[in-house]
Image: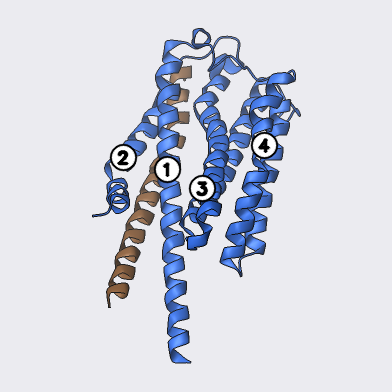
Chain colours: A brown, B blue
Amino acid sequence: MSHRIILMFVMAVPLLVWFGVFFYLLMIDRSLRQAEQEEEGNDSL
Amino acid sequence: MPAQTKSAAKLQGAWWKYTAGLLMAYVIYGAFAIAHGAIGFAEKGVAARVIFFHVPCAVLSSVAYFAGMCYAVRYLYSSHRKSLKDDWYSAAAMELGFLFCILCTLTGSIFAGIQWGSFWNWDPRETSIVIMLLLYASYLLLRTGLSRSPEKKARLSAVYTIVALVPAQFLIWVVPRILATMHPTTTLTDPRMTSITYKMVLYPSFAAFTLLFIWLMQLRVRSLRILALRKERALRRISEKY
């Protein structure tokens, strides 16, 4: 197996980890926005 | 809409978060596919690819401390209005500084293991980062120990951040420059030392990590705000009941 192909496999690991972290951060962002909206609703009551 | 709310609403847009995601993916791709193996490094120059992750983490761990100090000063100046918002920003910056400091130590240790044959060499920069980690850890312990009184916690944390600024910045920026170190010091200061393929990845990596830092900081401050609001409402309910 050539050096370049091995590098591509090595690259796949941090890339997959990053996509996982990125979508997890997006989920946290979304849930925080929901919580903020709930808090604003509670304040206006 | 007041100016502050307007800027906050702008920052809550998702475009820059997706930009951070794409930039980081580009940096990971570029580190292995665009940048060539560096001359004079172990394992066909593969070890040098860690620079795209290690250097931005190192710079951000220092910038985070400086940001934390700026918000700490702002808190102390505005403390008469009892606003904890600046304290939240300061704490978030310090927590992220700790995180980036750990990432910097880990990536640096991997590089040292491959390039210098030992994962830890007590190089001046390595010693500096250990002391930085201890400074951050002491800050977090101080805050945890004072969790019962938010005002006292905010005030003492702000004072600690300001007092520890000088040793923190001295360790990062001055000590490695006055003592002999194994770390290359001209990688960033002399652009002729870095090839174009490295610049094509290294500069976007600074942007990617900075955007990630801002995003994480924003998430942390928002969560602290929600927690404070919930606590305040719970206390209000109890006082109404009795």
- Whole-angstrom CA distance, mark 1 to mark 4, is 24 Å
- Whole-angstrom CA distance, mark 2 to mark 1, is 10 Å
- Categorize mark 1 by other alpha carbons within 10 Å: few (<14), some (14-19), many (20+): some
**Vertical comparison of B35 with B3: above or below:** above
Which of these two is toward me, A27 or B179? Answer: B179
- Categorize mark 2 by other alpha carbons within 10 Å: few (<14), some (14-19), many (20+): some
Check chain identity for marks 3 and 1: say if they share one. yes
Q: Earlier in the sequence, mark 4 or mark 3?
A: 3
Which of these two is toward me, A32 or B228? Answer: B228
Question: Any mark on residue B16, and which?
Answer: 2
Quarter of the rendering containing residue B197: top left
Of tags 2 and 4, the one toward the viewer is 4
- Categorize mark 3 by other alpha carbons within 10 Å: few (<14), some (14-19), many (20+): many
- Whole-angstrom CA distance, mark 2 to mark 4, is 33 Å
Check chain identity for marks 3 and 2: say if they share one. yes
SS assignment at label 3: helix
**Tag 4 residue:** B166
- Whole-angstrom CA distance, mark 3 to mark 1, is 14 Å
Chain identifier of the residue bearing label 1 in the image: B
- Whole-angstrom CA distance, mark 3 to mark 2, is 23 Å
**Tag 1 residue:** B214
Q: Position of residue B184 (x, y in %)?
A: 63, 17
